[in-house]
Image (cartoon, helix red, strand yellow):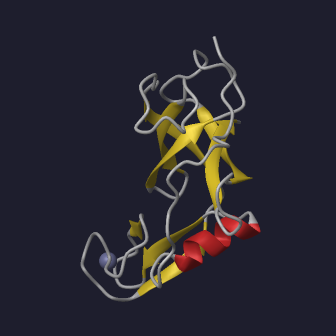
Amino acid sequence: MSLLTPQSGDIPLPVPGPISEPYWQGCREGVLRFQRCLDCGAPTHTPALLCAACASLSLEWVDSSGRGEIYSWTRVWRPVTPAFVTPYVPIIVTMEEGWNMLSNLVGCEDDAVAIGQSVEVVFHKSGGADNIVLPYFQRA
Ligand SMILES: [Zn+2]
């Protein structure tokens, strides 16, 4: 068993662009954001120019509750780069607002994860860049 913690090494980091900057600014402010279509109401994530459901250009940014449940998970022992501390547990979370996101579980032992578990977002500054704060999830 290993306690899952945020990655603190020199891991690959996102590069915010014009479309994704509101998402990353939200993370810096401790708010998880997603986009909602003003035409059909569908949520869209990851940040995009078009609605994933109807291709409308009319998207608004919405603050998420930050709560959801684990849809799927895996445990990683062989990381993409040596900068990642293993094991870590990537999870797909179904958010309360009906959208899914990929993140990592932290704050519990690596064998304490289960599909359907309630989780909430927590934010941690990355080790490698001052302007990047990453959303992780912990058990609620
Ligand atoms: Zn739409």
Observer-nearest of 56 and 29:
29
Query: Can you tell which quarter of the image residue 19 is in?
Result: bottom left
Residue that lies at the very extreme toward the bottom in this rendered image? 58
Q: Quadrant of the N terminus?
A: top right
Determine the residue positioned at 24% across, 76% down.
54
Residue that lies at the very extreme toward the left in this rendered image? 54
Observer-nearest of 27 and 55:
27
Determine the residue positioned at 69% across, 33% down.
5
Determine the residue positioned at 58% across, 15% down.
111
Residue 59 position (above or below residue 112): below
| x and y, in percent, of residue 77 in the image | 46, 22
Query: Can you tell which quarter of the image residue 50 is in?
Result: bottom left
Determine the residue positioned at 42% across, 84% down.
38
Residue 112 position (above or below residue 23): above
| x and y, in percent, of residue 16 in the image | 51, 74
Q: Quadrant of the C terminus?
A: top right
Residue 62 position (above or below residue 115): below
For ligand 1, the image quadrant comes to bottom left
Left-right relation of 73 to 110? left
| x and y, in percent, of residue 89 in the image | 52, 30
